[in-house]
Each structure stands twice: as structure tokens, then as C-alpha cells.
Amino acid sequence: MGGSGHRQPSPSVRLLLLLLLLPLGLTALVIVIALYPQIHSFFPSSSSWNVRSNGSSLQFFFRRTTHIEGEAPPPPPRRYRNISSWEGLSPPPQITLHELFSPKRTPTTWASQFPYLSDRGFTSQFLPFPTQFTQQHAMHNVCIEEEGRLLLVNVTEDEVGQKLPGGGRKRPMMWYVLYSRCGNVTGSECVGVRYVSEPPSSARHVPGNTLHFISYSKRNTMHNFAERVWPRLTLSVPPLNETMEGLPVHHFYFHQLDKVMNESSYSDDKSQVLWQFRMLMELWPGADLLRIGAMEGDGEPTTLCFDTLLLQMQIEDRMDLTRTPVEVYGPAVRKYREATLRFMGLGEPEIPLPPSPLRVLYYGRSELSRRRVLNHDEVLDFLLHNMSHLNLQIRSLDLMLLSNQTDYTFPRLVSLFSQTDLLVIAHGAMTVGAVFLPIGAGMVEVFGPCDWWKPRDRYNDSNDPKSWVAPLTHSVHVKHDLSNPFRDSVANPKRGNTTLCIDPAKGVPDYTIDLSKLAKAVNSFACPQAPGDRLTLHWLHDWSTTQRRNGQSS
């Protein structure tokens, strides 16, 4: 009566159903017990799978798909003190992107704060650039519309081609790639150019010199630094800051800043791009960030017209192709490094003196899909047990990433690398962190089988693999080993767009590290490169005496 109307079975019916189902349950239990060894051999144990909670081994990562019946199960994961945590290190600064680009931390001027343009009869023109070792292109009297497109005033496309360096229609590649190839349609990968007889009536006048920044559109923070940030560093130091027109920089304009900001909410790579740009601003204290929209509450669309705009066209000067001598780019890199550390409230990093341990960071790209080092645990075991002549405090960036102890954001990268004395790292985007290593630190960069191409450095006769990061390590006096201690090439069917690294037979391969070659590479850092070399002191220290003393005190 009432209720849902569903009739409940009587107690006798329930008992009958229980008696019928009980044999079926017992039969299923017997089958599970009989098949348990086969099931266990196919699925690794929970301690091997749960890397996010134990953070101590990656052995499961590369074996779980190949473990077959009859094969010995993988050994239990070793646990190393602090291997995947920040314990013992200073924590990274807690600065969000919202805080970073707040008026308190980033001087900002909105378009509506500039006066309206009074001289509307000007002509856009390119400025000459120094030809000694750079190609920094700048324009006078050029405008940018609200969506980011360039406006060239009182000049035709053909006339622009004749006035660009080279003359005629031989224009610099990056003018086509970044500015004109998309016609008058703007996008994240191309600014777009529109030719007008005069600027719009709503145009605002921006006096002084403005640096135009276009971020690298793909998710590669090393390319963003090498192609977008690197070419601008030398503008802040002699001789360019004293001789080039368009300097010093008074304003910065970031192409499609709001779009990149939105993407940074789900992409650490975009977040790091914004940080790299913001630290570039620190090289010109007092410079502000231009926001082409109006201030909150003022919805007037507008156009900015600049006295001088430094264009993003320096592909010829990117980091791996630079013709700039180390006497110029070295001070520029150190200036960027010092400005970043100061902004984050980090002191100048130093290698600790013995008997304090050397802080070792290992990274083998385990969380990625290609060019991975497959013997992660073997490398860590070797460093712990076969380098007993040193006192090493080892961390795995692979495990820190997999256990969510860190991520790719810029403050954490800077903080972690600035507290690393020995870096063993697979070639890739993460090597950009080398600029924040302590002066005199050691870095083993492992290229793997990409070395089959044997790229030669255009500025020396070495047969070593060419490293994009070499100018950074030279600048901060890091001992950079390029012996490439890899052992086996492992075919990886997932090819990637890695320039000059695609083996036709094996795609973009994974690989393993040769432990004896790695030991030789690490021990090469014992050789001093300057008086008072702190790294060398760790090889000279009598660790056996220290261990005996510690044993007695305990």
C-alpha cells in the first residue's frame, strides 16, 4: 500500500536464491585462484604501477607492456632519499602569472593613456641595421591595430621590398614568415600587414622605442628562447646598446598577449614563454608593457602608432646560429640570468663546498613520447653505488614530474636548476635551464642516436654533436660535456618533427645511457677550469675521512 508499489520477495524465496547462487560464487573463486599466477605475470604489482604515490622508480614505465609469462618479474623499486621531492632544497617562489602581470610587478600602459596622433602625414620606413654581427630590423612610423596587425602608412608593398636590406624583392625570410605571408589577416603565427594612405582617426601616438615580441607558436620553450628571446639580449649591452638606432627600449608590445595568457591556463609551455618575455623586460628597467586594448571601462577600439618599432625578424641571430662573439653575448646572457634570479628573490647560486654533498639532477624525458632514456633506474643505481668517491645527493626530474612534485613552469625550473651542481640531461627543451646553473657547475648533455648525423659546429672543427645550449653554458662558465654517452638505440615508431634527428630506419629513437661512458663524462669535471674551482674540490676531498667522522659522531 502506498510507497513505490514494488513487492519484496518473501524470506523463503530469498533463501532459495542464496542457495542457488552460492555454488556459482565458489566456482568463480576457484577459477580466480587457479589463474592468479597468469594474471599477476601480466599486470605488475601495485608498488610498480603506483609511481605517482611512491615516486621511487620508473622500471614499470618501460616494462609493463613487454612483461610476458615466464619472465622474471622486475625487482622491487629502490627508494632513494629525496629522489623525487624538494626536501633539502629551497622551495620555488610562489608567483602566479596573474601576479606577474599585475601592475604591481609589471609596469603597464594602456592605449587610451597615450595622446591621439597629431601628425597624420608620416611615411613608414625601415631603418638601417648594424651589419657587424647582427640583423636587428626596426621601422619608423609604423602602427599596430588592436588585433595585432601592422599598418604601414603612405607606402606600397613593392616600395617596402625595395627599402628592406638587400633591395628589390629579396626580403629577409622572417619578414615573410612572421609578418607578410598571411596578407592582411593576423594570427598567432603571422602578424599580417595592411597598407594604408593614412592612419585611422582613433590612432594614438607612442613616443620612443618599442620592442615587438612574437612568441614561438609551437610548444617548445627552448625554441622560444633561442629564436625570440636570445636575439634581443645583446641589445641591452655594448656595443649595440650604444650604436644601434631604436635603443634603449622604452616599451614592449607582445603580439596577441591575451590569447597566450589564456592558453597558459592549461599549458605550462605557454606559461614559461610569458615568463621568458617578462624577464626580458627586466633588461631595460623602467620600460613598460603596452596593452593595445583600452583600460577597463573604456571600450574604444584603437590603433597605436610608434616612433620606432623593433621588429621580431632575427632568425639569422638565433642561438644556435649566432655570429655574435661570446664577448658580447656572454655579458648579455649573464645580465638576463642575474635579472631573473633577482626578480624571483633568489640569490646567486653557488656550488657547496665539501663535505656538503653535490646536488645531482637527472632528466631522461621519461614522460614524453620520443627521444627517451629507457634505463632510468639503472642510471640512478649507478650514480648512487658506483660513484662512491663523491658524496652525491641525487634527484630525478622524471620522477618529480610524474609524482607532481614539480612541473614545467618557469619559477620551478629556475629554482631547481639553480640548486643543481651536476646535471645529466637528455637533449631537448629542458636544457634551457642550464643558464641558471651555478657558475662552474657540470652538465652532461646526452643526444642519443641523433648523433648518427654528426652535426658539425660551424664555428669550430670539433666532431662533437652541435648543442643549441652551448652559448648558454659558455656564458655562465658551466662545464659542458658533449661526449654523448649513449649505448643502445631503441626503435620508436612514433616519429616526431625533430630537425635532422630522424633516422630513416628507426624513426626518432629512444635510447639507453652507457654507464661507463657516463662515469667518464662525470669524472671529467674534476679538471679545474679556473682557480678555486668548487667542483674540483669535491674530487680532491677525502670522503672516507668524512664518512668515518660521521660514523663516530652518530
Image (tube, rainbow, N blue to C red):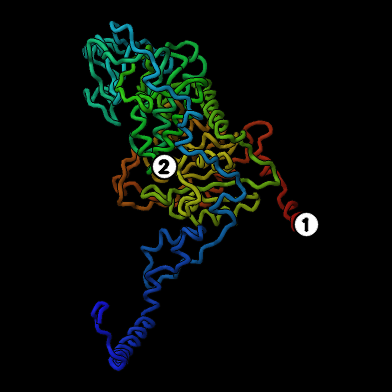
Name the one closer to the observer, 224 or 77.
224
x, y percent for residue 464:
46, 36
x, y percent for residue 6:
24, 80
Q: Nearer the viewer, mark 2 or mark 1?
A: 2
Image vertical order of residue 409 relative to residue 244, above or below: below
Q: Is residue 126 in view? A: no
What amino acid does circle 2 point to? Asp
Quarter of the picture containing the C terminus is: bottom right
Q: Residue at x 44, y 69 (%)?
A: 45
Name the one closer to the observer, 548 or 481.
548
Quarter of image, res 385: bottom right
Q: Which mark is residue 268?
A: 2
Name the one closer to the observer, 452 or 545.
545
Looking at the image, the residue that sits furthest to the front is 2
Mark 2 is surrounded, within 10 Å at the Cα level, by few (under 14), some (14 to 19) or many (20 or more) other residues, namely some
What amino acid does circle 1 point to? Ser
Q: Disc 1 marks which residue?
A: 553
Q: Residue at x 29, y 48 (%)?
A: 505
Image vertical order of residue 311 relative to residue 546, above or below: above
Mark 2 vs mark 1, CA separation in Å? 46 Å
Name the one closer to the observer, 404 or 437.
404
Image vertical order of residue 321 relative to residue 379, above or below: above
Q: Secondary structure at mark 2?
A: helix
